[in-house]
Amino acid sequence: MTRKFKGDKLLIATHNQGKLDEMAQLLAPFGIAVVGAAEMGLPEPDETEDTFVGNARIKAHAAAQATGLPALSDDSGIEIDALNGAPGVYTADWAETPTGRDFVMAMTRTNNELEALNAPHPRTARFCCTLVIAWPDGHDEVFPGVMPGHVIWPMRGEQGHGYDPIFVPVGYDITFGEMAAHEKNRISHRADAVAKFTAGCFG
């Protein structure tokens, strides 16, 4: 039996404003306001696991322990079949620079590696999202989501964040980067995980 969330404000264990904005929009229909980890002054814990669920658990439990509040975390990334699932859990790491994250650099690296392999088209991929809600007593619930598609080059679109400008979801001919936020939020990997989370913890 899934533990229910009681309350109207939920701590989201992320310092990523793009993710926080998406979560706010996805949870708004349930009357849930969100507050981010940065706003609470929480440090970013080291993500030392090699799975989405492992890293999501680290972030959720760290935030719940630090604040005494239930905390929802998201670990997500893109898996590209021709790269044996890379960058996967290291999606954000591919964008790291000494002055912050540079996703144009990361997307360029991704395309360069695919070209070096002469990977056939379509270059199938999927965005994965694992949500974990953790309570201060150590209990947690896990909700995975996925959106299949393929990656393209060159980049297209100014919307979204991360690798959105090179990802075309199944059934569409535009990238997440070209898609209006409300449309992406209807079909995305995060929307899939949030739908499972809300059904489990609010249903």
Image: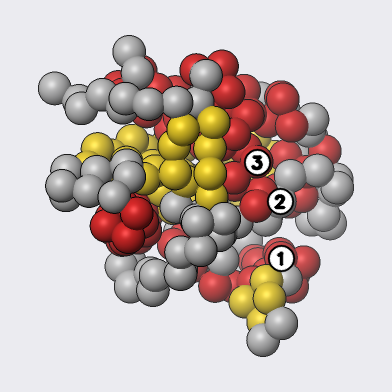
* Picture residue at 82% right of the left edge, 38% below the top: 178
Report if residue 202 is visible in the image.
Answer: yes
Check the image and report above or below for 141 versus 125. Answer: above
- Quote the CA–CA distance across marks 3 and 1: 18 Å
Kindly identify which residue carries mark 1. Answer: 103
Place of residue 61 in the rendered image (x, y in percent of width and height, measured from the top left): 28, 55
Kindly identify which residue carries mark 3. Answer: 21
Identify the mark at residue 161; answer none if there is no mark.
2
Place of residue 152 in the rendered image (x, y in percent of width and height, measured from the top left): 74, 51
| Of 4 and 154, the residue lying toward us | 4
Report if residue 187 is visible in the image.
Answer: no
Q: Mark 3 or 1 closer to N-term?
A: 3
For the C terminus, the image quarter is top left
For the N terminus, the image quarter is top left
Q: Is residue 12 left or right of residue 157?
A: left
Q: Is residue 64 left or right of residue 42?
A: left
Check the image and report above or below for 155 versus 141. Answer: below
Binning the other alpha carbons within 10 Å of mark 1 as few (below 14), some (14 to 19) or many (20 upward) gives: many
* Picture residue at 30% right of the left edge, 67% below the top: 49
| Of 70 and 131, the residue lying toward us | 70
* Picture residue at 65% right of the left edge, 41% below the top: 21
- Quote the CA–CA distance across marks 1 and 2: 8 Å
Q: Are marks 1 and 2 in contact (CB under 8 Å)?
A: yes
* Picture residue at 71% right of the left edge, 82% below the top: 99
Callout 3: SS:
helix
Q: Mark 1 or 2 closer to N-term?
A: 1
- Quote the CA–CA distance across marks 2 and 3: 11 Å
Binning the other alpha carbons within 10 Å of mark 3 as few (below 14), some (14 to 19) or many (20 upward) gives: few
Amino acid type assigned to the residue bearing label 3 in the image = Asp
Place of residue 8 in the rendered image (x, y in percent of width and height, measured from the top left): 45, 26
